Amino acid sequence: MGMEPTRRLFMGGATAGVVAVASGAGSATAAEAAEPGPNDLGWHDVRAYGATGDGTTDDTAAIQAALDACEPGNTVYLPAGQYRTSEPIRIPPSVTLQGTHGSGENEWDVKDPEFGLKPLPGFTGVAVVLILDQLRGGYPRRALEPRIFQLTIDGSALPRDGAEVDGIRAVGQIQHFQLRDVQVRKVTGVGINNTFNTDVPKGPQAPFCLHFERVSVQWSGSFGIALNNCTDSVLHDVYVLGGDGPGWWIAGSGNSNFVSCRAEWTAKEGFLLQGWTGVIQFTGCSTDRNGYDGIKVENKDARGILQLSGCRLTRDGRNGGAGGGGYAGLKVVGTTAKVLADGLLVTAGNDDDGALQASPARGVSVTNSAYTVVSSGFLDGVEIDWHDGGGNTRLVKGATV
């Protein structure tokens, strides 16, 4: 995934309805469910296609039949219940998959939710939900505006020693992919994975113009969220907790805004940024107790700019509880892109119960980089607050830091 990204080829819910349909659907029995087809609001109830949501039955075929029956602009509705699946659910272009609830923060040992999509132990496929571009999906129209609202994806039944299964995977030239009030938890692969279609004749293409709001990814087996060339995107209140890799991997996703996004307790970096052109802006984003650096920047493209405004980086660099290791709240290494920060807060500390060693070792650490300016803020590292590793062309610490 570390390849230099290729620029894409082109640029290119009604609340009242949700309440009305949800209320009506919740009071109907399976026997009373309508015949297959949309209601007056363009909603397809999966029970009309044979889904049960009973937590046991394989509902894959029924859910897919409802999605395949949609016209552009239709919604497939999953009433309250737990829908078990055995292979990926595919969302066509301009279609919405609507659940009843997207879970918030749940620690690993809290009881798993009894609603949403839950893949069976024998699940086969690359992701619980799969979104394909026009070429891969064989659609008659471009892959515009697939949407997922109010849905929980629970991968807790997937074998921990089995194949990696992503929660949501979007592949290829997909524009304006939207998530709102969505949680992905305990999948064995990437929580939300956006990746290239390498079969495009004019070069690899990836999803772009993403819009995510109130999304959480918890305890994934790999990256929490992977953004691969997802340019011109806006992500607001998106939270990654735990997991076996970096919380966020961001590459080639210039001209994008991240507002109040967070990475906590991941095994590696909170945010790992590599190889982009254009501007990436972080506003009010935060980290806490990640295993490696809170934010690590590695970008050899001088056309890239990273702006951090009012970001808070706390107790990162846990290093397995030992601290040290040269980890930092903000680390910039081998970077020719410009990194600018204002109101940056890096604080050191122990775990909540006071156990383990305090971290991070360094507040800000910059090595072999072209242009890094921290104009204001508060920096606290256990070993050193401001680390100049040498080889820097311009490294500035503002007078008010």
Image (tube, rainbow, N blue to C red):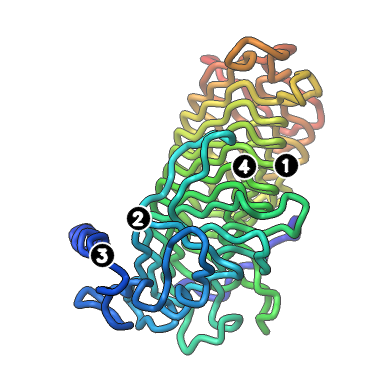
Q: What residue type is labelled 2?
A: Thr
- Mark nearest the camera among 1 and 2 is 2
Q: First in sequence: mark 3 or mark 1? A: 3
- Mark nearest the camera among 2 and 4 is 2
Residue that sits furthest to the front in the current view: 31
Figure quadrant of residue 237:
top left
Percent x, y for residue 336? Answer: 71, 44
Q: First in sequence: mark 4 or mark 1? A: 4
- Mark nearest the camera among 3 and 1 is 3
Percent x, y for residue 275? Answer: 69, 52
Q: Residues within 10 Å of mark 4 (few under 14, many from 20)?
A: many
> Is residue 268 at least partly visible in the picture?
yes
Q: First in sequence: mark 4 or mark 3? A: 3
Q: Which type of secondary structure does the marked residue at label 2 adopt?
A: loop
Q: What residue type is labelled 4?
A: Trp
Q: How far apart are marks 1 and 2 (CA)?
A: 44 Å
Q: Residues within 10 Å of mark 1 (few under 14, many from 20)?
A: many
Looking at the image, which is closer to me, 58 or 171?
58
Figure quadrant of residue 228:
bottom right
Residue at the spot 25% in from the left edge and 73% down from the top edge = 32
Q: Which amino acid does label 3 sit on?
A: Ala
Q: Mark 2 points at which residue?
A: 100
Q: Name the residue under label 4.
A: 219
Q: First in sequence: mark 2 or mark 4? A: 2
Residue 134 is left or right of residue 330, and the answer is left
Q: Mark 1 points at which residue?
A: 335
Figure quadrant of residue 68:
bottom left
Q: Residue 25 carries which label?
A: 3
Q: How far apart are marks 4 and 1 (CA)?
A: 30 Å
